[in-house]
Amino acid sequence: MNTKKSTLYPLLQKFLQFQEIGTGVTAAKSKSTLENYTRYLTVFYTFVNDVLGVHYAEDLNVSHIDDFRLFLARKISKKTQKPLSLQTQGYYLIAVRAFLKFLHTRDIASLSAEKIEVPKSGERHVEFLSKEEVETLLYHAQKTPKTGARDAAIITTLFSTGLRVSELCNINYENINIETGEFYVQGKGAKYRVVFLSTHAQHALREYKKRRDEQLQLSEINEKPAPLTPFFASIRGMGKRLDRGAISKIITNAALYAGIVKKVTPHVLRHSFATHLLQNGADLRSVQLLLGHSNISTTQIYTHFTNHQLKEVHKKFL
């Protein structure tokens, strides 16, 4: 009889490797998802290994998960200096559940993933900008010395397409077609979708592209940048690709200069895109496709404050 047990740490490393490369059933995870999984599972492993003394997958049980949930409930976020939100606690448990599912596919005996209960965080609050606030944001972004054209192009593109910030960061020269006003992006789960540029976004991107071409020293005679050249890049650092943090900082600074009191992030612009579409009569299914949501229930968070028909009914009968 084989009594050898499976040590947790190597299994966690193997799990993360498979998330990076994907399998025949699931696609490779994005860089940000991998970073999150690594962070969440490192905390989980440290707790069960160092605090609970659980070293093997076969020894995990529901009681250990309950202890981990209590640990998360008491954990203070370094960023906010407040206890972790229920939503963040859920992210940890979702990562643990994915790991346990992975063990099952490898015929490694352990706790069933179905035993992991993810706490409900209640109704999600969505922040978005009005059209006037977006225009104000753009006006002040354009005034930024040296980077105004780029920053305005970033903000307009996010608002025009509803792209995730990671999708925007990954755009290369060969991906984007300004003249047709539409192009494909690779989103979550390595899925591709088409996004569309407004006339205003096309204009902003043309202005930025002129300066970007000058930075790359491209001539007008059939000269193209090298493959995988980042479209949105740092003015310094020889055209280094802008990352999520840099994009967020650009938008936060523009909002600060514009005097917008809301916390403005790339995702707030994505929320604004979806909200304005629905307010102007777009159907939920179309918005789902434009956002790249796998499940329409994710898109439904926007319907609570965009259903003007209900408002008109209320006015008519009261």
Image: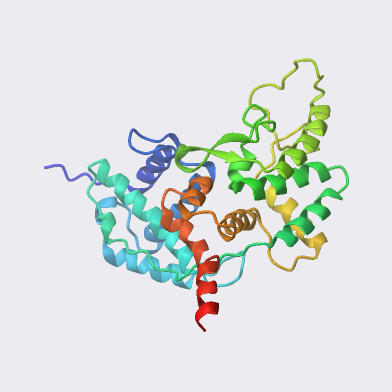
**Which one is in front, 53 or 294?**
294
Q: Quadrant of the N terminus?
A: top left
Would residue 37 appear left or right of 167 to someone viewing this image?
left
Task: Report the label total.
Answer: 0
Residue 205 lies, in percent from the top left, at 74, 38
Residue 16 appears left or right of 217? left
Pick the residue in front: 13 or 165.
165
Q: Give 298 or 120, whichever is nearer the viewer.
A: 298
Compared to residue 227, the image places residue 72 above or below, namely: below
Query: In the image as oriented, which residue stretches furthest toward the left?
Result: 1
Work out whether residue 291 or residue 217 is closer to the camera in this orientation and state it: 291
Q: Position of residue 253 (x, y in %)?
A: 77, 56
The answer to whether residue 168 is seen in the rendering is yes
Q: Residue at x 87, y 50 (%)?
A: 143
Residue 44 coordinates in the image, percent (x, y): 42, 57
> Is 316 left, or right, of 172 in this rendering?
left
- Which residue of the protein is positioned furthest toward the front in this rendering? 316
Tell me the colour scheme of the image. rainbow
**Position of residue 123 measured from the top left corner of the image (x, y, whole percent):** 47, 70
> Seen in the image, is 18 located left or right of residue 142?
left
* Residue 226 drawn above or below residue 23: above
